[in-house]
Image (cartoon, rainbow, N blue to C red):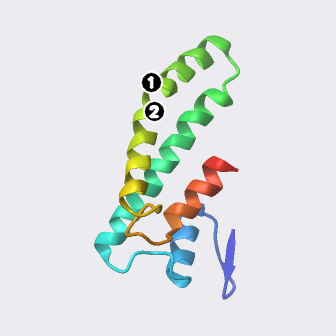
């Protein structure tokens, strides 16, 4: 939860986007922000696919969800890897953005 000027916001992605603008981690244009947002959404998609089987208690359902994740995640991760290679080690425009921090926070830790 973010509390600013006695106002509260509880949605983490909205908070991240807000703070990114405050701390120069957002794009400089609407087009840049569109790409950064799309990358963040992709990162969240990955996390959801992993969580779907990780927290599943029914072993048969868990196995099916794991198989689905194993079939789709390599493709998505390859796309993100290519994106980083094309942007000098970052997700967009060769500079640190909140997409990079989101990846580290949600997937690596």
Toward the left, the furthest residue is 31
Residue with the mark numbered 1:
71
Q: Is residue 70 left or right of residue 3?
A: left
Which residue is drawn at the image coordinates 53% and 75% (left, top)? 20
Q: Position of residue 22 (x, y in %)?
A: 54, 84
Between 91 and 10, the one lying in front of the other is 91
Mark 2 crowdedness (10 Å alpha carbons): few <14, some 14-19, many ≥20: few
Q: Position of residue 72 (x, y in %)?
A: 43, 30
- Residue 11 circle label: none
Total labels: the figure holds: 2
Secondary structure beneath disc 2? Answer: helix
Toward the top, the furthest residue is 60
What is the distance, in whole Å, between disc 2 and disc 1 at their CAs?
Answer: 7 Å
Which residue is drawn at the image coordinates 50% and 28% (left, top)? 69
**Is residue 68 positioned above or below 93 on the image?**
above
Quadrant that contains the N terminus = bottom right
Residue 10, image quadrant: bottom right
Mark 1 crowdedness (10 Å alpha carbons): few <14, some 14-19, many ≥20: few
**Is residue 81 positioned above or below 12 on the image?**
above
Which residue is drawn at the image coordinates 49% and 80% (left, top)? 21
Q: Position of residue 70 (x, y in %)?
A: 51, 25
- Of badges 2 and 1, nearer the viewer stands 2
Residue with the mark numbered 2:
74
Residue 28, image quadrant: bottom left
Between 102 and 12, the one lying in front of the other is 102
Toward the bottom, the furthest residue is 5
User: Mark 2 near mark 1, Cβ–Cβ under 8 Å?
Assistant: yes
Q: Is residue 68 left or right of residue 10?
A: left
Secondary structure beneath disc 1? Answer: helix
Q: Position of residue 15 (x, y in %)?
A: 58, 70
């Amino acid at each position: 939860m973010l509390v600013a000027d006695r106002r509260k916001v509880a949605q983490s992605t909205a908070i991240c986007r807000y703070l990114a603008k405050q701390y120069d981690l957002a794009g400089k244009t609407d087009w840049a922000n569109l790409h950064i947002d799309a990358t963040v959404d992709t990162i969240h998609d990955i996390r959801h696919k992993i969580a779907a089987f990780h927290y599943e208690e029914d072993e048969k359902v868990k196995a099916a969800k794991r198989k689905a994740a194993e079939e789709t995640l390599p493709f998505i991760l390859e796309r993100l890897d290519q994106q980083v290679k094309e942007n000098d080690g970052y997700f967009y425009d060769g500079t640190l953005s909140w997409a990079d921090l989101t990846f580290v926070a949600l997937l690596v830790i």
